Image: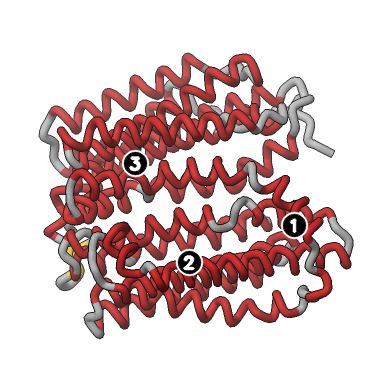
Amino acid sequence: MQSLIYGTGHVLVRFITFLLLPVYTNLFVPEEYGIVSLAFAYMAFMNVVLKFGLDAALMKKYVQAKTDDRISFYTTAIGFFGGVSILYALINIFSASIMSKFILGIDDVQYWYYITAIICVDILWSIPQLILRTEEKPYPFLIFSFINAFGTLGLNIYLVAKLGMGVKGVLASNAIASSVLFLLTMPITWNRVNLKGFSTEKFKEMMRFGLPFLPSGIFAMTMEVADRYVLKYLGNANDVGLYSAGYKIGSLMLLLVMGFNMAWQPFFLRLGKDDMNVRQLFSHITTLLASVMIYVWLLMFFWIGDLVKVSIGSFSLLGPEYWSAIHIIPIIAFGYVLDAMYLVQLPGPFLMEKSKWIMIVRGVGAMVNLGLNFLLIPSYGYLGAAWATCLSFGIMAGFLFIVNRTLFPIPYEWRKLILIIITASIFFGIIFFITVSFWVKLFLSFTFPAVLFFLKIIDMSQFFKPTLKSPK
């Protein structure tokens, strides 16, 4: 239940950013939205880099420690993050003009001051949120997530849509929301800090555990954000804006992936690897996940071109200037189908305690993503960036499959998986190669799951076999 609550908070923030898409794409030209996208990509990347993996280490050590040691670990961590934030802010204040030109492509230091403030404050208020998770206090965690999500949404609507502050309104909204959350979470820090508890030994202990997580985080963020900067380098902010708008809609699939992963990791960690039927269960879950993800992807492929053009008043889901990006949406969405196929294979490295493979696979994915972006963008523009993202997720899933053949082999239901792919390909081909009416698409939307049940590809009784023992 707690995993569901934490997952809800995380997914909610992602969903709110999607709700802002109609505001941005109807009020901003693609070049302006490109600047917004570059800013958020940079902030997400630095939010990982500036934590140095110490957030993961704090969670582990805090859980295992007694009360006095908990205070010491927290004091040491928050002291370090405070120092990093101050140092980062000072560096950015003196280099604002240079950094604004280099990262955003514009010479306006005010943009950079907002970005600096958001990064510094987000680092500091995310640590109390982490402690709420560690202390198993899901409801305060969810309340702060709601404040973050709806506060950001409301401020954006007011500053951007009503006052017309443009890109600065977007950044100001996030800076205000983050500052409010920092103030609201201050009591959590105040009640857990003792200046005498700062310990260099505790700091070294946390860094020894946390620093190895940094490369994995950097690789993951490279997969998420590098394409925008390669597009800016090889193209312009207009291309970045169009690509980011299409990417945002395609990443709706990510909400489904995140929801699965929030439940998946605790599930397979509790289940373990010893029961003779566990791997068979993982195989059934893979088949079901593939069915659901491909079906949702087909629905998106069928209908997204119509849905993004639906107008409510003067607003459509995607502003008319961005409709040329519609064709990349299914490509990005299919990338997240492949990402789900990567995540469902994680029991191997986790249960066999070979987590180095996660870093290696992510590293390969990040390098392939960068290489494909530089290879494809000069010829295909932002369409090439979309294919680079999709193919790199596929390579990650394939690489982990090869690793697991030795590390943690699973008897996949290959007949069913092949039938799913063939069926989906037929449905895809009908829509892609033949001009069809609304009623044909509606018929196909309901027919796909019916075909899977008819072919006995989906059989829920497999998940209730009495031979599978629950973990004690």
- Which percent across, then down, holds residue 13? 47, 63
- Which percent across, then down, holds residue 209? 72, 46
Which quadrant is the C terminus positioned in? top right
Q: Which residue is mark 1?
A: 203
Q: Which residue is mark 2?
A: 119
- Position of 325 with respect to 458 (left or right) is left
Asked if the residue at tag 3 contacts the one at tag 2, i.e. Cβ–Cβ closer than 8 Å, the answer is no
Q: Mark 1: few, some, or many residues within 10 Å (few <14, many ≥20)?
A: many
Name the residue at 78% across, 25% down: 274
Dot placed on the residue nearer the N-terminal end, 1 or 2: 2
Q: Mark 2: few, some, or many residues within 10 Å (few <14, many ≥20)?
A: many
Asked if the residue at tag 1 contacts the one at tag 3, i.e. Cβ–Cβ closer than 8 Å, the answer is no
Label 2 vs label 3, nearer the camera: 2
Asked if the residue at tag 2 contacts the one at tag 1, i.e. Cβ–Cβ closer than 8 Å, the answer is no
In the image, what residue type sits under mark 3? Ala
Q: Is residue 444 above or below residue 37?
A: above
**Residue 330: mark:** none
- Which percent across, then down, holds residue 215? 55, 41
Q: Which residue is mark 3?
A: 333
Distance of label 2 from label 3 (alpha carbons): 28 Å
Q: Secondary structure at mark 2?
A: helix
Which quadrant is the N terminus positioned in? bottom right
In the image, what residue type sits under mark 1? Phe
- Position of 64 with respect to 247 (left or right) is right
Label 1 vs label 2, nearer the camera: 1
- Which percent across, then down, holds residue 333? 34, 41
Distance of label 1 from label 2 (alpha carbons): 22 Å
